[in-house]
Image (spheres, coloured by chain):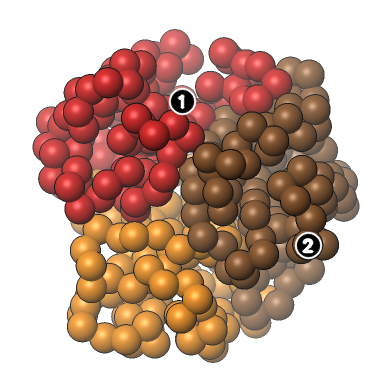
Chain colours: A brown, B red, C orange
Amino acid sequence: MSDIQRHESNRRMSRIVVHNGIVYLAGVTAAVRDGDISAQTKSVLDTIDARLKSVGSSKQKLLSAQIWLKDIERDFAAMNAVWEEWTAADGAPARATCEAKLAAPELLVEIIITAAL
Amino acid sequence: MSDIQRHESNRRMSRIVVHNGIVYLAGVTAAVRDGDISAQTKSVLDTIDARLKSVGSSKQKLLSAQIWLKDIERDFAAMNAVWEEWTAADGAPARATCEAKLAAPELLVEIIITAAL
Amino acid sequence: MSDIQRHESNRRMSRIVVHNGIVYLAGVTAAVRDGDISAQTKSVLDTIDARLKSVGSSKQKLLSAQIWLKDIERDFAAMNAVWEEWTAADGAPARATCEAKLAAPELLVEIIITAAL
């Protein structure tokens, strides 16, 4: 068995899990929760960048992304604008997006990432 | 590091990502959006077949599936009928299904697949 | 190609899929559906323990978890209490939780797990 590295870990979750060359990130929400969808998406992507970098990965190595939006009709286009600015040329992951109510009412977006090391 | 192959890729997403023997498909929705749940599910599964085949995989090698339905109460049984007709004997993936509002109102089903090469 | 093992499998899904050192579990719901969120979460986690054990894995080896709650506002805290009691010290997965309507109205929680062998 390959071993498993866990980072920023408590009993609820590990923010980063690394196993056999794959990085699994916990769902990321905005650090500052009072922003609009653009601000929250930027915050989420900054956190993803930092977490991937902390284990030696990067947005160039994204494998899959799942995106949950509180209001997909209102916020899909604005989230995509920030997202598409952020992704690396030739680095976009397999992605799926749906609407979902998140763990706190002020959260507008949550993104779940897997990446290669 | 294994390298990463991306297909049908733009800045928003890659429809297919292959890494270390695993195929990650972006969420697939129906090519023709005015069909009912049976027609849309068939269209989604046709697209999945084609994308898996394009990289040398197939529905015999499914690992996991996540299925999002716009109306799970109305459409769960009809989606399952098409799905169970489609899966290979001894080839069904680990699956989970929930209701979720999708990126356009006419979309009734979206399926996210991972498979082995 | 590594081969794929499927367990508790029918045409709809395999409850357990093992491939290349990774265990993919189908979404798990409560065995007894008339319980409250604490009882249903306990039942789900018992099933996860049993399925992981059946293939030689365990909750010490969790990689990722996705948790769907029927009513996240009402049930998030109580689900977390059971979950955090259950996880192994230094064994928590990358996790994400949202609200989602599930396949039957009495189901309050569904959990999707991947783990290492």
Residue B100 sits above or below residue A7 on the image? above
Residue A112 seen from this side: no
What subunit carries mark 1? B
Q: Give the image location of residue B66, x and y in percent.
A: 39, 44
User: In this rendering, which labeled residue sits more in front, label 1 or label 2?
Assistant: 2
Based on the displayed image, in which of its 4 quarters is residue B44 positioned?
top left
Q: Give the image location of residue C10, x and y in percent.
A: 16, 47
Q: Are marks 1 and 2 on the same chain?
A: no
Identify the residue shown where x is 70% and y is 21%.
Answer: B11
- Classed neighbour count for the residue bearing mark 2: other residues with Cα under 10 Å, few (<14), some (14–19), many (≥20): few
Identify the residue shown where x is 61% and y is 67%.
Answer: A105
Dot 2 lies on which element? loop
Residue A38 seen from this side: yes
What subunit carries mark 2? A
Q: Give the image location of residue C24, x and y in percent.
A: 42, 52
| Left or right: C9 as drawn, with respect to A57 | left
- Residue labelled with disc 1: B117
Identify the residue shown where x is 35% and y is 31%.
Answer: B107
Which of C114 and B100 lies nearest the eye of the viewer? B100
- Residue labelled with disc 2: A34
- Classed neighbour count for the residue bearing mark 1: other residues with Cα under 10 Å, few (<14), some (14–19), many (≥20): some
Disc 2 marks a residue whose amino acid type is Asp
| Left or right: A97 as drawn, with respect to C94 | left
